[in-house]
Amino acid sequence: MSITSVDKNLDGLTMTVIADFTASRQRLWEAYTDPRQIEKFWGPVEWPATFTRHDVFPGGRSHYVMTGPDGERSGGFWEFLAVDPGHSFEVRDGFADESGDENAEMPSMRMTFQFEETDGGSRLITTTHFGSLDQLEQLIEMGMEEGMTSAMGQIDDVLADLESFAASRVAEAQTLSDTQVRVSRVIRGTPEQIWQAHHDPDLMKRWLLGPDGWTMPVCEIAHEVGDTYRNEWEDENGENRFGFTGELLEAEPPFREVTTESMIGVEGEPNVNELTLTPVDGGTLLSLVITYPNAEVRDIVLGTGMVAGMEASYARLEGQVFG
């Protein structure tokens, strides 16, 4: 990676950083739109980031927390204003608390990310638009320029790691915090197709079965915010029935929805599931962030073989529904 220029325009209240890469434009784009990838380079080397939300569509939002060497934490958010897939996106960038809520006492700024093809690979042009000269000077003094330069210096390693990211088609779980886990899987198909597969009961009964040997006799869909859903499974002998129910909290088809989830017949605080679908080369990146009531519940659920069951379902979706 080569940063070819850093231009601070005090009259125009902008800072523009231009960097060239040997990877393709599409590969660079995916590094910025996949939460598993961007959190490996967004922020200075000493302040790695964790993205608990990353919705790359107009109206979407990202939440991240950077952790310093002494354990100090600093949160931020992106509000996506415009997205031209593969070519550019524009965000409002600002400071946030641990839950992703904006810190209104700190300035926010508008940033544009433009991805271009070059003879040697690709170029990223990042332009930050400040609200005032005082704001520009304040953020530069806080180390914004050095932070962006340090962050871009880490991108090459991520771009080279195709096996772990862009080429991965197996469900994997990453622990984000004591209560949060992110399950990711690249699935063949468009976001629209995968959204439909999650909201058509006839389709869901064909693929959302976990390991072989189970059926899904009950599949009730929540169509509007505030609606409830109910899913139940039983084995091929009609025994060992179990299920989950919950409420639809947010829906932005075909890219994002948020639901609660409680096991039927079990008391306690529900999980919160945040599903995001992002188009990538060769399919769609499905990202499911699950927030558990506490670490004990998280570990119990993961210990049941949940991720292996999800992988079996996603493989069945590709093979039987999209095959």
Image: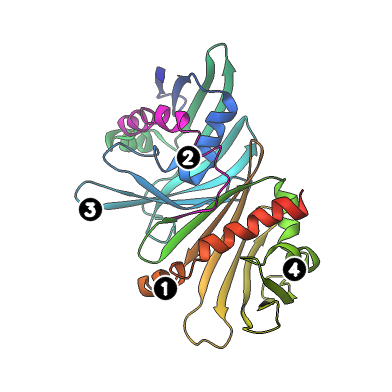
Residue tagged by mark 3?
71
Identify which amino acid the numbered label 3 is placed on.
Gly
**First in residue order: circle 1 vs circle 4:** 4
Image coordinates for residue 316, horizontal then vertical, percent: 69, 56
Residue tagged by mark 1?
300
Residue for point 37% across, 60% down: 177
Identify which amino acid the numbered label 2 is placed on.
Ser
Image coordinates for residue 169, horizontal then vertical, percent: 58, 45
Q: Is residue 66 visible?
A: yes
Residue tagged by mark 2?
164
Identify which amino acid the numbered label 1 is placed on.
Ile
**Mark 1–mark 3 distance (CA, rounded to whole Å):** 27 Å
Q: Which structural element holds mark 4?
A: helix
> Can you say whether 158 is above or below 236 in the image?
above
**First in residue order: circle 4 vs circle 2:** 2
- Between disc 1 and disc 3, the foreground one is 1
Q: Give the extent of the magenta segment.
A: 145-173
Neighbourhood count class around disc 1 (C-alpha, 10 Å): few under 14, some 14–19, many 20 upward: few
Near-viewer residue (11 or 311): 311
Residue tagged by mark 4?
205
Residue for point 77% across, 54% down: 321
**First in residue order: circle 2 vs circle 3:** 3
